Amino acid sequence: MSACLFTGCVNKAQQNFDRPPAPVTVTEAITQDVPTYLDAIGKTVAREVVSIQSQVSGRITKIHFTDGADVKKGDMLFTIDTRPFEANLRQAQANVSRDNALKKQAEANLAKDVAQAKWGEVEAKRYGILVQGGVVPREQYEQLRANADSLNAAVEADRATVHSAEEAIKVDAAAVESTKVQLSYCSIRSPIDGRAGQRLVDVGNVVNPGGSSGNGSSSGTSGSSNSLLVIERLDPIYADFT
């Protein structure tokens, strides 16, 4: 009985020891990006938002874009009536021409009076020698001396006139440049690449720098009361989750 039990235990242990291993699935390890998804509520935000405003007062004569169109930096957006500024420019240029003519006339007068003053000094000195020798009366010398002094005073006045003409030329030349700048502001161009919103003015509206203008419509994008248009740069575009 004992021998049978022992034999049975040995056979059972051998059967357990000889069992084949269980199959295992093996996968090669690799490195790769694992996408991460996050659901959140947010809004898209333009990289740049530019409010287009007028820098001069005037009437809109032309609109060069359509609402919602893509525009490039330097593209024409609006044209303001240039006629008043062109008239001011012509007037300023005429003032410069007049000042140059006055300067030339003053320089001619100066040259003439300088020559006369030199001759007057020569005559006064010559008669001064003669009056000392008793050749001519003192009254004649004094008359020539007074005439020489008068001519010298005229020379100084002519120099002042020339200087005044030069200063007038500078002032009017600056007015010419200022008017040219004002005239350039009549052409309103896009400062950035972007997408145009809804225009806030129509042809015929009078616009003013720093003042309200337009037809009262809203583009849906924030802008000041005197905005003519809002342009947004959408490439790239940002997402705001705050």
Image (cartoon, grey):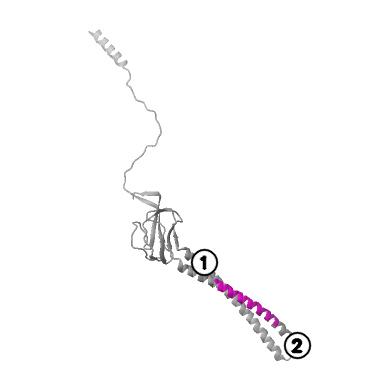
In the picture of the structure, the residue carrying the numbered disc 1 is 177
Residue 98 x, y percent position in the rendering: 56, 74
Reply yes or no: does residue 118 show up in magenta: yes
User: Foreground residue, 188 or 142?
Assistant: 188
Reply yes or no: does residue 34 show up in magenta: no
Query: Magenta region: which residues?
Result: 96-119
Residue 126 x, y percent position in the rendering: 74, 85
User: Foreground residue, 116 or 138?
Assistant: 116
Residue occupying the point 27% across, 9% down: 7
Numbered disc total: 2
Residue 90 visible within the image: yes
Residue occupying the point 64% across, 84% down: 150
Residue 93 x, y percent position in the rendering: 53, 70
In the picture of the structure, the residue carrying the numbered disc 2 is 130
Which image quadrant is residue 209 in?
bottom left
User: Foreground residue, 113 or 100?
Assistant: 100
Residue 161 x, y percent position in the rendering: 59, 77
Residue 209 visible within the image: no
- 56 shown above or below 139: above
Residue 35 vs residue 84: left or right?
left
Q: Amino acid at mark 1?
A: Glu
Closer to the chain start, of discs 2 and 1, is 2
Q: Amino acid at mark 2?
A: Leu
